[in-house]
Image: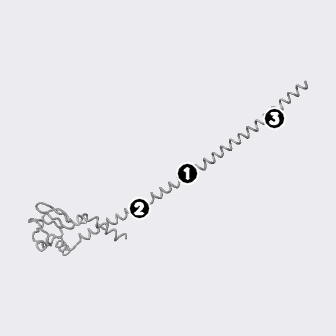
Amino acid sequence: MPGLEHLIKKILSDAREEAGRIADEGRAEAASVAAGYERRAGAEKAELLRKAAVEAEALKARLISTAKLSVRDKKLAAKQQLIETVFAAAVQKLCEMDDAQYAAFLTRQLSGAELPVGTEIIVPERYWGKLDLSAIHPDLRLSVSNRRIDGGFVLVSPDSESNNTFEAMIANRRGELERIVAERLFL
């Protein structure tokens, strides 16, 4: 049976060699597959990093743009508030006219105006009794209305009313005046 043992040894040896060869091929194939996956993972990683960088730049640009818009809006709001302050101060200054200045203002505003008979003028209470309305316009009479106005005047005729308070006069010319004020303040 030495021949049989020798045959068994030979079969076992061949089987071991075949198993080693198969194991080596398996390891080589596993290494090849792993290397392929590593290359693909590296490529995907690089692509993800590239996309993340692009998205980060886009986000950065949006944040900068949003910040710039916010700053611009705050500047505009501050400028608008300053303009409002100027208008309020202008109305206040106009309302503080002394008697002579107010009489001259009324004369400039009403000279040459054709007013219907019976037209009344409402003036701030502080000027009552201090104005010579006949010198300002012969057809005017002081209204006894209890309406409170701070500055300017209101004309009331039998068929209409004209609001010439300082607030109304400025509001009517607001667009033009706002441009002028902005040019003087900000340029």
Horizontal and vertical percent position of residue 161: 15, 62
Query: Gap in Å between the C-alphas at discs 2 and 1?
Result: 30 Å
Q: Callout 2: 10 Å neighbours few (<14), some, many (20+)?
A: few
Numbered tag placed on residue 166 in the rendering: none
Asked where in the image residue 181 lies, by quadrant, the reply is bottom left
Dot 1 or dot 3: first in sequence order is 3
Asked where in the image residue 175 lies, by quadrant, the reply is bottom left
Query: Gap in Å between the C-alphas at discs 3 and 2?
Result: 80 Å
The residue pinned by badge 2 equals: 72
Residue at the spot x=27%, y=69% of the render? 90
The residue pinned by badge 1 equals: 52
Numbered tag placed on residue 17 in the rendering: 3
Q: Which quadrant: the C terminus?
A: bottom left
Q: Callout 1: 10 Å neighbours few (<14), some, many (20+)?
A: few
Asked where in the image residue 178 lies, by quadrant, the reply is bottom left
Horizontal and vertical percent position of residue 7: 86, 27
Type of amino acid at the residue the image marks with label 2: Arg
Under circle 1, the secondary element is helix
Count of residue discs: 3
Type of amino acid at the residue the image marks with label 3: Glu
